[in-house]
Image (cartoon, coloured by chain):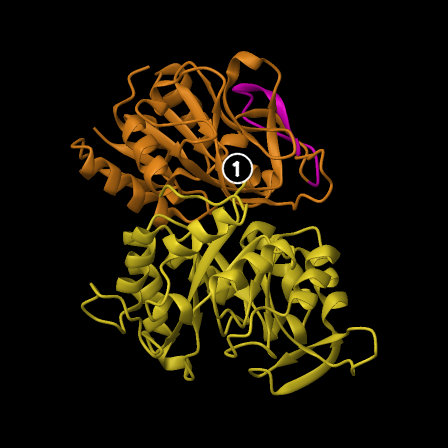
Chain colours: A yellow, B orange
Amino acid sequence: MLKVRIIPCLDVKDGRVVKGVNFVDLRDAGDPVEAAIAYDAAGADELTFLDITASVENRGTLLDVVQRTAEACFMPVTVGGGVRTVEDIRVLLKSGADKVSINTAAVTNRRFVHEAAQKFGDQCIVVAIDAKKVSQPGEADRWEIFTHGGRKPTGIDAVEYAREVTALGAGEILLTSMDRDGTRKGFDLGLTRAVSDAVSVPVIASGGVGDLDDLVNGVKEGHASAVLAASIFHFGEYSVRQAKEHMAKAGLAVRLDR
Amino acid sequence: MSVAIVDYGSGNLHSAAKAFERAARESGHDQPIIVTNDPDVVRNADRVVLPGVGAFADCRRGLDAVSGMVDALDEAARKKGRPFLGICVGMQLMATIGRENEVKEGLGWIAGEVDKIKPSDKALKIPHMGWNTLSECKSHPLFDGISLGPDGLHAYFVHSYQLYPADKADLVAQAEYGGAVTAMVARDTYAGTQFHPEKSQRLGLALIANFLTWKP
């Protein structure tokens, strides 16, 4: 039977992990490849690198990270951040990424999703959606797409957009609640469920994980196929193994071998 | 001794090559792993691996675009009986025909068609993406020493289409996803996995190591 996936996410800037990863046996807390190897050994089901490098010149450091990770880790790796062209995707896949995640470029040009899926196959095209709740209390829930790290509203309905990009060939949706991101209050379960139930492809819940119950809720109440978290794993608060055992106890099917 | 991984513009050959190198090294059967688009190298390799991601017809066109490659594959795997492993769409290409978006001929080594996965439970997501266990339909040397079944090791899948073999004798393993999904097929000296051994950690590296010593 198919298992729920747990996906640690590493923010990478100029080839280094932002804020570092705090594992006891890591020699260099800022090396994304070391962190990836540690997560591979810990039984993570996939890994996501989010590149937040500001300058194009330093983009090469990311490719080096991806390449070295692919040499050492035999699990699926998704890379996102700054993916704007077919050539960006080609270079990332060639470096060893298994999937790429497209964010702003899909919002500004939907055809890009179609073009990318046609070229490389639906299975490697993830569309990342950053959404915020825009409905007022008492109104029916409504979420809107925001770009530029949640600062720029687009007026696009998140659920409608998820349907649209799926029809264009997105093989998976990485859904982040910008209201919850960094708050540790748990996923926006209403948003997660609305999108998961609206599309036929897997949805990865992201943004707001504070404890292990949040992961369980993302799947049970949010109907997500996978859960993504960063800080609860990076700072050694919980291990991937603990997360999986907790989810198993809650009745979710997880992969405990590696 | 050499292993040829066929490069026809489809898929992530870098990580496939690294997984084969690692498995070769760790199993004590170190041998050159060559990523190649040269039909002569494929023809003369001791083992051949055909990866593939994307749509069936695109992959078939990609393969046809490398002049002489289809003949070289046939010669190595079928005439010379060299062990052959197809991965994902590389495995699907072994079928008679593919029906993804358009109808396209496969290599015709395994009688059967490639068509949509149709889970009985409509709530199940497509693609079938993630880690699943395998159930064995018949024993095969590529699974030697690998724990299978619901409590066994997991394999990584990502696909929306599957190979439906005409002859059930070609079916080696299945995964459960709202019904049985073909996970591995084999006949004579050629085998194919729908899952990605190069992404399947322990199960994957063990299967690759078995392939490197497989003497069909």
> Which quadrant holds residue B81?
top left
Looking at the image, which is closer to me, B181 or A136?
A136
Left or right of A39, for residue A251: right
Q: Position of residue B46 (x, y in %)?
A: 27, 25
Q: Secondary structure at mark 1?
A: helix
Answer above or below: position of B47 versus A7.
above
Measuring 59% from the left and 55% from the top, which residue is drawn there?
A219
Looking at the image, which is closer to me, A42 or B130?
A42
Which residue position holds label 1? B89
Measuring 61% from the left and 56% from the top, which residue is drawn there?
A224
Answer above or below: position of B95 versus A151.
above
Measuring 55% from the left and 53% from the top, which residue is drawn there?
A120
Q: Position of residue B51 (x, y in %)?
A: 44, 38
Answer above or below: position of A136 versus B114.
below
Q: In the rendered view of the protein, which quadrant contains the N terminus of chain A?
A: top right
Q: In the rendered view of the protein, which quadrant contains the C terminus of chain A?
A: top left
Looking at the image, which is closer to me, A148 or A219?
A219
> Which quadrant holds residue B72?
top left
Q: Position of residue B37 (x, y in %)?
A: 38, 41
Measuring 28% from the left and 59% from the top, which residue is drawn there?
A68
Answer above or below: position of A70 versus B45.
below
Query: Magenta segment, which residues?
Result: B101-116
Left or right of A63, for residue A219: right
Q: Position of residue B191 (x, y in %)?
A: 43, 24
Left or right of A38, for residue A80: right
Farthest residue in the bottom direction? A151
Residue A168 colored in magenta in the image = no
Q: Chain of mark 1?
A: B
Residue B107 colored in magenta in the image = yes
Q: Amino acid at mark 1?
A: Val
Farthest residue in the right direction? A139
